[in-house]
């Protein structure tokens, strides 16, 4: 198979080396070269990124995204694995659907597509889906989530937390009290009061997280909290971790960068769930990501077709793109700010999300003998964001912004999916 | 000025200019032939996604008195009820050559979206968007206050006047627009209502706020008190326990009216729930200017249409 050497890369610890890849695996990190030599001077080599929260929309919403276009977008963003959320149509609540999604991912061949299974049948919050069947399926589902909806029934949540211990699974909770957020349109605060848009109060997220960390503690289970968005949520996670509760938490790139002030123009490109919060929340989320209270960055990449955003705010869909911009925002928050380092970047973008998920062959430190999932980025590049990239949708919240860093190469299982920032034609290998 | 989307867009001079034009329009409305040729050949569309006979009629009369061609495009019985998007409706009106669109919509920001989307070139007038704003209502309220308390004198503002807005502040587009405009004109605005319906974020922009109407009347000598309509869906959503309790604590009744200064104006944007936020003694008292508000609505909307659409031709 392939044999090449990335010459002169910078590793996360700042040292320089050549990385040899042979037959899909890293065969050397050092001074040697063999096969084709590819100059990688000035590029940082990192383990391929792993997204724990991606909406690929297929099956059912192929007008927004397909497993293939979402995989391509992921590869361009430096990812070698994504976790496909369950809110498709039909919902990924059976072994059949999760196996189909995995098969579509393998067929596309750009990233490892790991399906997430629904916690409840049809995401309806009434009855547990067949979690064991999904875990035992070829898709080997370990992460379960009703994302888009909250598992709000405390009894059902308690049972789900306990039940996934049968196969070492984890529940990823979309923390949103449904009664406190009926018809909510944006963050509840000064801006929503002025704009007359129904508020989504911070307490609707925080009260569910507080409840669920206690349920997890009582059950002796792991729990993962999706898209943390408020300063108060950070405090609860910090408290829970200090208490020894097995909780992990993610933050999206957009909650690290954007605020509710952007709603002022009523442009629904900024309508997202959970909503963009205040600058105070952004600062708390950044600090928590740096100090480890928040474990990972997950994109919540949520493609929507034009007609779902080209309308009045109230009628628009929630969600924004994220796969091709996440690494840039992570770089901005962790590196360019001077507040953290590339090792932390690797943790939040690759090793930790893989560890939470238990996905095999992903999120491993670059080392001889490991599968060659490698992302090379040029941190000195600046790029102006235009359009939705490889995504089928164009709901790009960073349109016109200049973001730091560029993914130059993405190597998935030893083969280029992205080379010189361009997609490489793929297919089942 | 091309659009009127929010009271926020009106500076003091601009607001006073519109009110002054409305004085001239009021004089036209007192003539035997209540008509000006100003907007002859212009097409004005009343685009109403919510029922509101009052506001729609007021705009229709205003536009017709300025000789505009008026088309009523209501959600019921049109393609809108078949699920046509705002974009397609707007582009249809654009293709038909509308010069002005008066929009009433259930979504906050809909007027803003129409004006900024590029779907249509017409001037957009916000006739109420969700729970956001209703700027022409605020203009007609300001006009009525100036008429009654400042002798209807051109060029004057509302400096020093104390005005209470009472009721469901949180969901009221009338309250939002008045809070902004009346303060732009120099008045002190106080917000009064149940704690569930007076958002702190809005109260922070007011001269003061009260959860008790009695306390407010005791502490402040109001020059005008504006009662907001209570929507029945607020009760089912537990913002307050019952209509009886609301009327008892926040309703303007004869007893409370007697405690207000003798000349305090009693205002209501209509339609009233008699016996709920206002009782007959208050609504029909000599202090009530509620019908004057309706009459002034036409003059003020003529003034707004004139400023947006006439291109500055003289009023004869």
Image: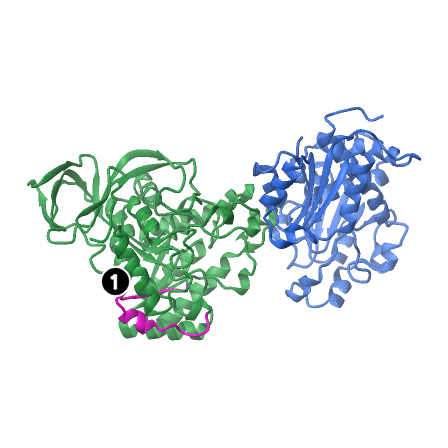
Chain colours: A green, B blue
- The percent coordinates of residue A411 (x first, y second) are 21, 46
Q: Up-down: is A332 above or below A80?
A: above
The residue carrying mark 1 is A358
Question: Is B237 left or right of A92, judged from the image as shown?
Answer: right
Q: Is residue A138 magenta?
A: yes
To which quarter of the image does residue B177 belong? Answer: top right
Closer-to-camera residue (B193/B97)? B97
- Residue at 69 percent across and 34 percent down: it is B99
Q: Up-down: is B259 above or below B21?
A: below
- Residue at 81 percent across and 62 percent down: it is B275
- The percent coordinates of residue B148 (x first, y second) are 86, 40
- The percent coordinates of residue A256 (x first, y second) are 40, 47
Q: Residue furthest right?
A: B32
Q: Is residue A193 magenta?
A: no
- The percent coordinates of residue A335 (x first, y second) are 29, 41
Q: Which residues are magenta?
A: A125-146
Q: Residues within 10 Å of mark 1 (few under 14, many from 20)?
A: some
- Residue at 64 percent across and 66 percent down: it is B238
Closer-to-camera residue (B57/B176)? B57
Q: Up-down: is A289 above or below B314?
A: below
Q: Is disc 1 placed on a helix, strand or loop?
A: loop
Closer-to-camera residue (A263/A285)? A263
To which quarter of the image does residue A44 belong? Answer: top left
Question: Is A349 left or right of B178, judged from the image as shown?
Answer: left
Secondary structure mostly taken by the magenta-highlighted segment of the chain: loop
Mark yes or no: residue A353 visible: no
């Amino acid at each position: 198979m392939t044999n090449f050497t990335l010459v002169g890369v910078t590793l996360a610890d700042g040292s320089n080396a050549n990385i040899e890849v042979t037959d899909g695996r890293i065969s050397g990190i050092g001074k040697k070269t063999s096969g084709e030599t590819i100059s990688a001077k000035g590029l940082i080599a990192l383990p391929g990124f792993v997204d724990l929260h991606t909406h690929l929309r297929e099956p059912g919403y192929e007008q927004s995204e397909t497993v293939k276009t979402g995989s391509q977008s992921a590869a361009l963003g430096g990812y070698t694995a994504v976790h496909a959320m369950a809110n498709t149509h039909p919902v990924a609540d059976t072994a059949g659907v999760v196996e189909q999604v995995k098969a579509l991912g393998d067929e596309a061949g750009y990233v490892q597509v790991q399906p997430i299974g629904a916690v409840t049948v049809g995401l309806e919050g009434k009855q547990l889906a067949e979690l064991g069947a999904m875990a035992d399926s070829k898709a080997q589902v370990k992460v379960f989530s009703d994302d888009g909806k909250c598992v709000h029934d405390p009894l059902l949540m308690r049972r789900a937390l306990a039940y996934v211990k049968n196969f070492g699974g984890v529940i990823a909770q979309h923390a949103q009290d449904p009664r406190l957020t009926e018809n909510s349109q944006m963050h509840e605060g000064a801006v929503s009061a002025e704009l007359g848009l129904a508020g989504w109060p911070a307490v609707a997220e925080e009260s569910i997280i507080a409840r669920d960390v206690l349920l997890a503690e009582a059950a002796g289970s792991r729990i993962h909290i999706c898209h943390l968005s408020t300063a108060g949520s950070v405090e609860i996670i910090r408290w829970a971790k200090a208490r020894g509760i097995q909780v992990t938490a993610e933050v999206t790139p957009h909650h690290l960068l954007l605020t509710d002030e952007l709603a002022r123009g009523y442009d629904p490109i900024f309508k997202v769930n959970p909503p963009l919060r205040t600058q105070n929340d952004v600062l708390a989320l950044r600090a928590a990501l740096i100090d480890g209270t928040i474990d990972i960055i997950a994109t919540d990449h949520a493609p929507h077709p034009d007609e779902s955003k080209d309308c009045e705010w109230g009628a628009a869909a929630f969600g924004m793109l994220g796969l091709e911009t996440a690494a840039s925002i992570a770089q901005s928050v962790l590196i360019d700010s001077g507040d953290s380092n590339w090792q932390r970047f690797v943790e939040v973008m690759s090793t930790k999300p893989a560890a939470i998920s238990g996905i095999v062959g992903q999120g491993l430190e670059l080392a001889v003998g490991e599968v060659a999932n490698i992302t090379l980025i040029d941190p000195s590049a600046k790029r102006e964001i235009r359009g939705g990239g490889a995504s089928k949708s164009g709901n790009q919240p960073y349109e016109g912004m200049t973001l730091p860093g560029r993914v130059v190469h993405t190597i998935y299982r030893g083969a280029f999916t992205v080379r010189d920032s361009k997609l490489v034609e793929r297919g089942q290998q | 000025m091309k659009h009127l989307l929010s009271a926020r867009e009106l500076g003091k001079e601009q607001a006073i200019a519109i009110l002054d034009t409305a004085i001239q329009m009021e004089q036209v409305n007192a003539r035997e032939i209540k008509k000006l040729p100003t907007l002859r050949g212009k097409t004005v569309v009343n685009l109403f996604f919510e029922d509101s006979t009052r506001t729609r009629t007021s705009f229709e009369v205003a536009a017709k008195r300025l000789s505009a061609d008026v088309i009523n495009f209501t959600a019921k019985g049109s393609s809108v009820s078949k699920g046509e998007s705002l974009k397609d409706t707007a582009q249809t009106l654009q293709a038909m050559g509308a010069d002005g669109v008066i929009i009433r919509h259930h979504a906050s920001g809909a007027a803003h979206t129409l004006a900024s989307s590029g779907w249509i070139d017409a001037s957009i007038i916000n006739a109420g968007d969700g729970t956001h704003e209703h700027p022409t209502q605020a203009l007609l309220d300001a006009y009525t206050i100036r008429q009654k308390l400042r002798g209807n004198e051109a060029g004057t503002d509302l400096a020093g006047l104390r005005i209470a807005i009472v009721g469901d502040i949180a969901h009221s587009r009338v309250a939002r627009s008045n809070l902004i405009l009346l303060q732009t004109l120099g008045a002190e605005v106080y917000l009064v209502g149940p704690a569930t319906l007076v958002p702190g974020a809005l109260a922070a922009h007011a001269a003061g706020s009260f959860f008790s109407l009695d306390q407010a009347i005791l502490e402040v000598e109001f020059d005008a008190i504006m009662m907001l309509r209570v929507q029945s869906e607020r009760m089912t959503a537990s913002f307050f326990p019952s209509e009886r309790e609301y009327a008892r604590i926040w309703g303007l009744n004869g007893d409370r009216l007697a405690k207000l200064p003798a000349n305090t104006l009693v205002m209501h944007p209509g339609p009233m729930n008699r016996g709920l936020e206002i009782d007959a003694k208050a609504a029909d008292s000599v202090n009530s200017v509620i019908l004057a508000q309706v009459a002034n609505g036409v003059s003020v909307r003529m003034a707004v249409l004139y400023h947006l659409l006439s291109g500055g031709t003289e009023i004869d």
